[in-house]
Image (cartoon, rainbow, N blue to C red):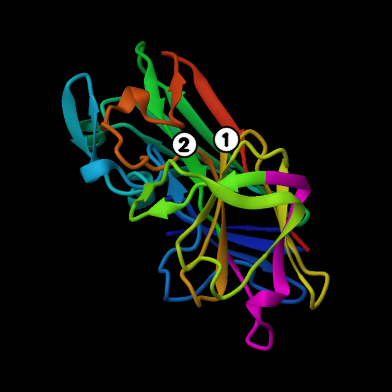
Amino acid sequence: MEIILKNSEVVATINTLGAELVSFKDIKTEKEFMWQGEVWKKTSPVLFPVIGGLVDGEFIYEGKSYAMPKHGFAQLKEFSFISESENCVRFFLRSSQDTLKIYPFEFEFSIVYTLEAKKLNIEYRVENLSDKEMIFSVGGHPGFACPLDEKRKIDGYYIEFEVAESAERFPVEGMFISKKSVPALKNSQKLFLSETIFNQDAWIFQNLKSEHVTLKNIYDASEVKVGVKGFEYLAFWAKPGAAYVCVEPWCGIADFVGHDKCFTNKQGNLFLEGGKTFSIHMPIEVK
């Protein structure tokens, strides 16, 4: 089932399966900013309660092994929803007997979409429903059309950071993260895209200074700004040669090569006290 949020400028479509944003269009120009192709069959999956791959597809908690799909199970679940206002809808997923078999924590996970002018604010909200500590990761994976039409080339697009960054990145080894970071940005505010930039998989950064990044191009003034404040990791990715780029703010990360599977010492995981709620925002603004 699809839920539509609309105002005089833009329209956003969210699928109840995975509470996934599947379309974000400018009404006047009919420009679609989200990826709509077949090479990668997702558009903007929500990542919870893990991010990336786990060694042998499992984690160990209190001496027991739990199987978990890559990027967690939220993207595979049908969410319930409540329309909180004309331009706001909250999707939510609660723990169940099925989830407890693969993830031993009681929770309510909400994704709140709020439309304001040409901005779609996305809030990830995690509530611990038990009195014991909860461990999780959460993040976004929106894929944006890039280039926007066949007359353009991807090497005319770039990621602009809010401030100049000097940072290394973590390479990907199979489904896992290399511990050996490599140079990537040197006092640079722009990361230029190309058809080959993701030949070795995603570019993953940690603790950048920028609170937002913007996908821009040399052809016109259209752009997509993504808020990343509070997210420890930020990744960029696309299947090589495909006409999209993903901007992925993460609270959490895939297993590093050689990880011992222990969930309590998995790098990037968040720890939430019993009865408490965690909230973080990923606004997307288009022009």
Q: What percent of the width, then of the height, locates residue 185?
A: 68, 51
Q: State whether residue 79 is above or below residue 17.
A: above
Q: What percent of the width, then of the height, locates residue 33?
A: 64, 68
Q: Is residue 119 left or right of residue 60?
A: right
Quadrant containing the C terminus in the rendered view: bottom right
Task: Verify whether residue 69 appears in magenta.
Answer: no
Task: Verify whether residue 165 appears in magenta.
Answer: yes
- Nearer the observer, 51 or 192: 192
- The disc labelled 1 sits on which kind of residue? Glu
User: Which residue is situated farthest in the top direction here?
Assistant: 131
Q: State whether residue 165 is above or below residue 136.
A: below
- Nearer the observer, 169 or 282: 169
Q: Which residues are magenta?
A: 144-166
Q: Residues within 10 Å of mark 1 (few under 14, many from 20)?
A: some
Q: What percent of the width, then of the height, locates residue 116?
A: 74, 49
Q: Residue at x 34, y 44 (%)?
A: 72
User: Which residue is situated farthest in the right direction here?
Assistant: 221
- The reply to whether discs 1 and 2 touch (Cβ–Cβ < 8 Å) is yes
Quadrant containing the N terminus in the rendered view: bottom left
- Nearer the observer, 21 or 257: 257
Identify the residue position indicated by label 2 in the image: 252
| Among the two numbered marks 1 and 2 on one chain, the one whose residue lies closer to the N terminus | 1
